[in-house]
Image: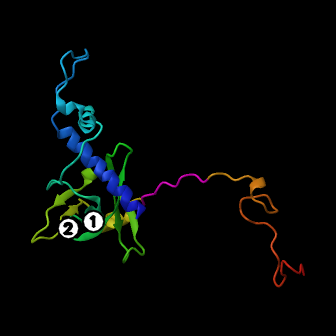
C-alpha cells in the first residue's frame, strides 16, 4: 500500500511539474514597491500562494497522461507483438523525473519472474484496440529480457548495533546469547 502511495505521489509530482511547465507564466513583477493600492483579489491568501508559484493545482488528467494506479500492470509486448511481461514498478529521481520502468519478465503469477529496468525512451506506446488498455512495446524479445541484467532495488544500510545494547552474552548483534539446551527450563536451571 505504501509503495502504491509513493508511486502515485511521484507521478502526481511529474504531472504537476509538466503542467506547471506548460502553464503561461505571469508577468514579471517589479522589484520596486508599488505605490498604487493592490487589487482586492491579491489580499486573498490563496491567490498569494498561487502568485508565488508554490501551489500549482492540476484540475484533470489529459488523454496523453497516465496514472500510476493504472500504469502498473501495463502489458509489455516484444518486437513480435507477443506479451513479454508487465510494468511492476516505476523508478524516478527526487525531482520526479521518471528514470526507468521496471518490468517483470517470465514466471507465473510472479513466481520465478525477474525484474529488469529500461529507460522510458526504450518503449513505444501502442494504443489499445476495441476499448482495451494501451500497451508498451519494446524492440526486444522475451528471451533477450530474460537474459538481461536483474534490476537491483536499493537497500539502505542497516544501522550498526553495539555490544552493550544487545543485552545478551556474546556482545554481537546476531542474538547469539546463551540459550538453554534441549530440555532445560529457565526456572529450574537444570
Q: Residue 159 versus residue 76: which sits nearer the camera?
A: 159
Residue 102 at x, y percent in the picture: 35, 59
Q: Residue 38 versus residue 76: which sits nearer the camera?
A: 38
Dot label at residue 141: 1
Q: Is residue 123 left or right of residue 175?
A: left
Residue 150 at x, y percent in the picture: 42, 60
Residue 174 at x, y percent in the picture: 71, 62
Cβ atoms at labels 1 and 2 below 8 Å apart: yes
How is this picture coloured?
rainbow
Q: CA distance from mark 1 to mark 2?
A: 7 Å
Q: Quadrant of the C terminus?
A: bottom right
Residue 100 seen anywhere in this rendered image of the structure: no
Residue 190 seen anywhere in this rendered image of the structure: yes
Q: Quadrant of the N terminus?
A: bottom left
Q: Residue 121 versus residue 98: which sits nearer the camera?
A: 98
- Vertical order, 77 against 123 (above or below): below
Q: Residue 138 versus residue 60: which sits nearer the camera?
A: 60
Q: Residues within 10 Å of mark 2 (few under 14, many from 20)?
A: few
Outermost residue, left side:
130
Q: Quadrant of residue 20?
A: top left
Q: Residue at x 21, y 22 (%)?
A: 29
Mark 1: secondary structure: loop
Q: Is residue 61 left or right of residue 11?
A: left
Badge 1 or badge 2: first in the primary sequence = 2
Q: Main secondary structure of the magenta part?
A: loop
Outermost residue, bottom side:
183
Q: Residue at x 82, y 76 (%)?
A: 180
Q: Which residues are magenta?
A: 150-158
Q: Residue at x 58, y 52 (%)?
A: 157
Which residue is under mark 2? 80
Mark 2: secondary structure: loop
Amino acid at each position: 500500500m505504501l509503495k502504491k502511495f509513493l508511486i502515485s505521489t511521484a507521478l502526481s509530482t511529474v504531472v504537476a511539474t509538466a503542467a506547471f511547465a506548460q502553464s503561461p507564466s505571469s508577468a514579471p513583477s517589479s522589484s520596486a514597491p508599488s505605490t498604487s493600492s493592490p487589487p482586492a483579489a491579491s489580499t486573498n491568501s490563496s491567490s498569494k500562494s498561487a502568485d508565488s508559484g508554490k501551489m500549482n493545482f492540476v484540475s484533470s488528467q489529459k488523454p496523453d497522461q497516465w496514472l500510476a494506479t493504472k500504469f502498473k500492470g501495463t502489458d509489455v509486448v516484444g518486437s513480435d507483438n507477443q506479451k513479454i511481461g508487465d510494468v511492476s514498478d516505476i523508478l524516478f529521481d527526487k525531482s520526479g523525473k521518471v528514470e526507468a520502468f521496471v518490468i517483470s519478465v517470465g514466471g507465473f503469477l510472479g513466481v520465478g519472474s525477474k525484474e529488469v529496468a529500461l529507460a522510458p525512451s526504450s518503449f513505444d506506446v501502442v494504443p489499445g484496440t476495441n476499448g482495451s488498455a494501451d500497451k508498451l512495446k519494446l524492440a526486444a524479445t522475451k528471451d533477450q529480457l530474460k537474459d538481461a541484467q536483474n534490476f537491483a532495488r536499493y537497500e539502505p544500510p542497516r544501522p550498526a548495533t553495539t555490544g552493550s545494547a544487545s543485552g545478551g552474552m556474546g556482545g554481537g548483534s546476531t542474538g547469539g546469547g546463551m540459550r538453554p539446551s534441549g530440555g532445560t527450563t529457565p526456572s529450574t536451571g537444570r
